[in-house]
Image (cartoon, coloured by chain):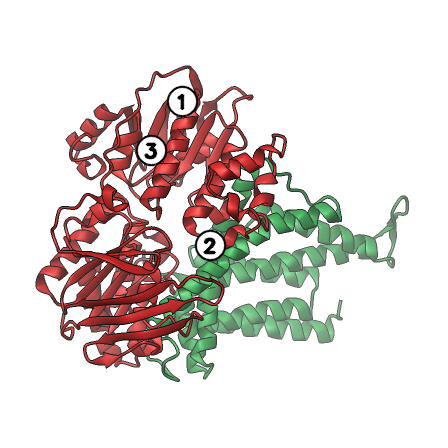
Chain colours: A red, B green
Amino acid sequence: MPSSDALDVTFRHLTVSYPDRAADALCDVSEHVRAGEAVAVAGPSGCGKTTLCLALAGFVPGMIPARASGSIALGDAEVLGAPPEELATRVGLVQQDPDAQVCTLNVGQEVAFGPENLCLDPAEVRARVGRSLEAAGIAHLRERATTTLSGGEKQRLAIASILAMEPRVVVFDEPTASLDPLGIEQLMALLASWARRGERTLIVVEHRIDALSRLAPRLVLLDRGRLVDRYPARERLDYAALGLRGAWTAARRDATPGADLLALRRVSFDYGTPLIDSLSLSLRGGEVVALLGPNGGGKTTLLRLMAGLIAPHSGSVERDPATRVGLVFQHPHHQIFERTVRREMELGHPEPLSAIDGELAATRLGDLATAAPLSLSLGEQRRLTVATTLAQRPRVLLLDEPFTGQDRRNVVWMIDRLHDVASAGGAVAFVTHDISLAAALADRVVYVDRGTWHAGPADDAFAWLRATGRAAFAPEARP
Amino acid sequence: MSARGLRRASPLANAFLLLAEVGAALAWPRLVFSAATLSVIAALARASGIPLRGLVPGRRFVVVFALVLFVAQALSVRSGAVLVSEPFRVTTLGILSGAEMGLRFLLILAASALFVRTTDPDRLADGLVRLRVPYRYAYLVVLALRFVPFFEDELRAVRDAQRMRGLEVSVRGLRRALQTARLTFVPVIVSALHRVDTIAISMKGRCFGLHARRTSSREDARSAWSIVPVAVGLALVAGAVVGRIWGGSG
């Protein structure tokens, strides 16, 4: 790609604060990123990672109201406060949610969107579209409707759309959040090839540091808005000691499976093409089950079948009507309805309301009882939705990607809650793309992929995945 | 699969057809004329490779709503020969008027569905820009259509969450209806606002609005098929005008 040379990025004493928050989002951050270097930015939820991305790309301050001081330089040019549309040919930002950033309905048109805004000649626009799709590895998708793409394909489309602007610095905000293991592998291979060539400066914000091992970037650690540490590229780190989310190595519980609490008997479901095909599975008391598979493979549909939200097209889902089922949704805002945290807990609460104070304290939300739930951080919202679900005393707890976008502390909290339910004789099933977490937690694994499925004890299932060419969905070594 | 029928026509020609269909139906709402227009829409859908059920999204709701319109209109018209006098007065004109109202509703819905399913919003935006509509406004059409499936998905997720929480959602009675609206629309609107923020960043980050004009890398969608929607639209308008002058206003 005839992109211009990569640029140095220099932050000097950068401080950013938002009008509605007392603490600074970024506080006196200074760092130099060399041209062509790959740097990962990590830290717990709310540490300022996304603010750093937004400030570098020109969205903070300005489009997002904030006060900022200090300096951000691209090469020799000062850019703090410059409007994003003026920076777009130098800095490209790939946001976390690949689906939400798609503006048009066709892949080729989506990639052409930026160059067309630059008023480039149509022939040059088409040439850039071709080059960008090629660089992102999705040239074959040029004529496809954007609505038909998988999560991984959409992520690559978002990258191609930014590449078409030919930026010299590319910033990724949690690029693995929506991707299945295969998508992560492909994305990291792409970024690693860029890093080797040094064509672009890469800044990658990420919770799942282990996912970056192939890219092997230099690591910068933020905590409560401050830059607290730096680690050279390829240094072996004890992520747990740093409070970061690396590969999970927690020991599994010794589970003694009890009676079937929920059973699927030869269940089939399709959306025109088969999604779940004659699947039989039981969730037993005391057991934790991981549901794995590629984006769009049918994991969420399987959870909805288990929860009774949709009926199978054939087969049956059986459970004692007295067995309560709770479902924690992938996006917390779908199951938040009230104006304060306390009222949210009270909504549909079956127990005497006096129990709520204890539940809020156990959720580490006691101090936020009067806060608006939607003003909480993503991690706090996730804890709240788990708490409101657990308040229903479910015997079967289902969770759809509960660990996505969560830092290590929240993941540990959630693992404890899952163990609480299983230890009390309940069954837990969770969807995840974090294979190391699945390996550490699950007694059994169910893999689904558009009609293909396999279920079995975790070790057997991972062996089957490796043997059938699906090694991306199995851990490298059993913890 | 190659594009067929109206999918090959110019988006502006399809937009003209939509306006002509709706305008003609409103100008001369006679049952026969509406039925004929609906038949034309069905034929164009078939020629464009769209199944007839694709013209009526949310079929159950649409049929119920059309029936409600029919009944309400039938009961509100007092003139004409009385068919039933107790407990409600139903007249021949009431039945005719109700049928016209229900059919007009179906016609407008089917015409809109045909337009949405045969017209590329990006090309429509290009066409509007060629008509000197500022591109910032033309792209609102693209974004509006982009958001339709999103709202459907969000609404489903929120309803699922309500069911799992055991929340009673009902529209019986004003208080319950308000409660249901709050429990449903607050999460959906919050989600939509989040989406709007993300897409605004995505657009600004690709220089949307930097210049007063923008280029289009797409070929101009001119094909012989563009004559069809224009000709059909003109025929419908002419039919409505003639019918209104010589056939009465209905």
Residue tagged 1: A423
Residue B239 horizontal/vertical position (percent): 63, 71
Which of B27/B163 is in front?
Answer: B163
Question: Which quarter of the rendering shows the C terminus of chain A?
Answer: top left
- Are the residues tagged 2 and 1 within 8 Å (C-beta)? no
Question: Which quarter of the rendering shows the N terminus of chain A?
Answer: bottom left
Q: Chain of mark 3?
A: A
The quadrant where residue A348 appears = top right
Q: Which mark is residue B149?
A: 2
* Mark 1 or 3, nearer chain start: 3
What residue is at 39 percent from the left and 84 percent from the top? B212
- For badge 2, the amino acid type reads Pro
Say left or right for A60 vs A11. right
Q: Nearer the viewer, mark 2 or mark 3?
A: 3
**SS for dot 1:** helix
**SS for dot 3:** strand
Which of A241/B9 is in front?
Answer: A241
**SS for dot 2:** helix
What residue is at 32 percent from the left and 49 percent from the top? A178
Against B41, residue B83 (above or below) is above
Real-space CA distance between mark 2 and mark 3, rounded to the nearest whole angstrom: 26 Å
Real-space CA distance between mark 2 and mark 1, rounded to the nearest whole angstrom: 41 Å
Residue B178 horizontal/vertical position (percent): 69, 50
- Report crowding for label 1: few under 14, some 14 to 19, many 20 or more residues within 10 A (C-alpha): some
Residue B134 is at least partly visible in this image = yes
Residue tagged 3: A291
